[in-house]
Image (cartoon, rainbow, N blue to C red):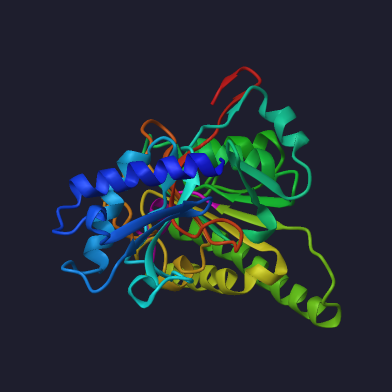
Amino acid sequence: MNDETYRALETQLIQALNLALHIEETSYTHSFDIRCDETGFFFIPRLPASFVVDTKLYQQIYAIASALLYPTMTLLKQNGAYFVPNSGGSFSTQRALYYPWQPGVAERLEIDDIESFSQDQIGSTLPIMENFDLDISKITHIGIAGQSGSGKSTFLIYLLHLLKDKGNVTICDPKLDTPSRFARQYNLRLIAPVEVVNKNDFVSSVNAELSSAVDLIHTRQRELFENPEITFTPEFLVIDELLALTENVSKSVSEAFQGLLSTIALLGRATGVHLILLSQRFDARALSTSTRDQLNMVVQLGAIDTRTTNFLLPDLDVKDIVVPQGIGAGLIQVIDGVHPSQPMPLLTPSFKVRGGEQ
C-alpha cells in the first residue's frame, strides 16, 4: 500500500471515531488524531482530556475500527491497552494507543494435489494460508483444539503430508481413526489400540514411546554439549484426542503420561523433538498447565467464544474479532519471533488427494 492509501484510512478512521466513540471531545477540537503505517494505526490523544485513556477506551476503538477496516485490514486483538511512545510531538501528544494489523483477511489455501504440493515445499517451510507461511524449525510444539466436525483432523492430515518428508513422524491414535490410516498408508510409526483392549495397557504403551523420546532428548543434549553446531533430524510426536486417551485410566498411568509430556515440552526445543497435540479442549484433564504453556503454535477451530478459547487462549477477549466461518475456520497464534504474536483469523487449507477431496 502507498501513502495515499494510508491517508485515506486515516480519514475514514477519524470520521468513524468522531461519530461512534461517544466522548465529549473529537478530532474537530484537536482532542485526538490518527496516524497509519504498514504495521498498524495509532490513536494519538491530546492530554489532558475529558476522557480516560485506558483499556476500556482501547477496546471501544478496536470494536469500531475492526468492522470499519474489514476486509482491507485485519486488526490483531490485544488483551489490554497497547501504549507506544509518539516521538516528535509535544508533551500532550507523546503517547499513542497502537493497533497492529495485517493486510487483507484470511484466505484459504486451495491445493489440487497434496502429494505434489508437499514435494514442492523445500526446507522447513510450512504453508498455512495464502501469504502466511511458517518455518517449522521455529515451531516447538503445536496444539490444535476443536469440537467434532470443526476440521481439526483434516488440518492434522494436511500437516502430516508436509511433515512426513521433513522428519520422523510417530502417531498415537487412541480412536484408531484417520491418523491411523494415514500412518499405515505412508508406513509411519503408529501407536494405536489395534490389539490392546485394556485402556491402561494402551496408555502405558504410549508412555513407553514418550519415554524413548525423553531418552533421545537426553542423548541429543549430550551431543549438543560436545558440538553446539550439530543439527538433528526433527522428530514429530503426534497424539490425537488427548481427552479420549486420558479418560478412565489409573492415576499412576495418567500422571506418568503427563510427566513425560511435560519433560518433552520443556526440553524438546533445542533437540528437535516436537509435540503435535489434538484435543476437543485442553483442560487440566487433557494436558497439564506446564505443557500447555510450552505450545508456541496454537489453533482453535470451530465455535470461537470465551468457553472454547479459555484453555489455549486464556487471556483473549474474543469480542469484536472478525472470525471466518465454515469448517476449518478459527484462530491461530504463533509465537516464533517472526509473525505477530497476537491471535489471527485462520482458514485451514483444503486439499485433494488421489481419489477424492479432504
Q: Quadrant of residue 120?
A: top right
Q: Is residue 266 magenta?
A: no
Image height of 234 relative to 109, above or below: below
- Quick check: 194 left or right of 188? left
Q: Is residue 322 visible?
A: no
The foreground one among 149 and 45 is 45
Q: Quadrant of residue 72?
A: top left
The picture places residue 258, in percent across and down from the top left corner, at 47, 69
Specify the quadrant that holds the C terminus: top right
**Which residue is at a point 77% across and 35% down the rendered structure image?**
119
Q: Quadrant of residue 267?
A: bottom right
Q: Is residue 21 visible?
A: yes
Q: Is residue 248 magenta?
A: yes
Image height of 331 relative to 292, above or below: above
In this view, the residue farthest toward the top is 355
The foreground one among 293 and 105 is 105
Image height of 113 relative to 262, above or below: above
Image height of 358 relative to 171, above or below: above
**In the image, which residues are magenta?**
239-250
**Which residue is at a point 26% across and 66% down the rendered structure image?**
55
- Quick check: 179 left or right of 12? right
The picture places residue 4, in percent across and down from the top left corner, at 51, 40
**Which residue is at a point 25% across and 68% down the rendered structure image?**
53
Specify the quadrant that holds the N terminus: top right
The picture places residue 264, in percent across and down from the top left corner, at 59, 69
- Quick check: 240 left or right of 274? left
